[in-house]
Image (cartoon, rainbow, N blue to C red):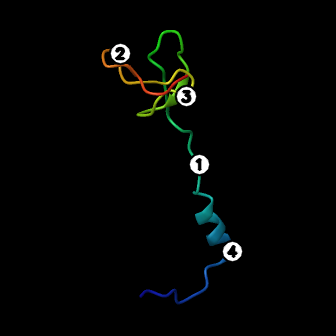
Amino acid sequence: MAVPKRKMSRSNTRSRRAQWKTSVVPTVTCVNPACREPHLSHTACPSCGQYGAKGARRQVVEA
C-alpha cells in the first residue's frame, strides 16, 4: 500500500480541495402540455405523475 513520504502542506491541501465543486442537477421539461414542470430525467414528474416521451406517455403516479 502506498504511503506518503512527506506531509502535504496546507496550501497544497486547500488547492486540491478547491476543485471539489458541486454541479447543477440536469432537469428536463415535462412532456404533458398542461404541466410543463422541470423534473429529473428518467423519472416520473412529481407534479402530474406522468412518465415517458410524447408517444409512449403513461400515468404512473396518482396526482
Quarter that holds the N terminus = bottom left
Type of amino acid under label 2: Lys
What residue would you read off at disc 1?
Answer: 22
What residue would you read off at disc 3?
Answer: 46
Residue 23: give x, y in percent of width and height: 56, 44
Answer with the quarter of the image where residue 41 lies.
Answer: top left
Type of amino acid under label 4: Arg
Q: Is residue 17 above or below residue 27?
A: below
What residue would you read off at disc 4?
Answer: 10
Q: Select label 3 or label 4 by which is in front.
A: 3
What residue would you read off at disc 2?
Answer: 54
In primary-sequence order, the first of circles 4 and 2 is: 4
Give left or right: position of 13 versus 32. Answer: right
In primary-sequence order, the first of circles 4 and 1 is: 4
Type of amino acid under label 3: Pro
Q: Residue furthest right?
A: 10
Residue 54: give x, y in percent of width and height: 35, 15
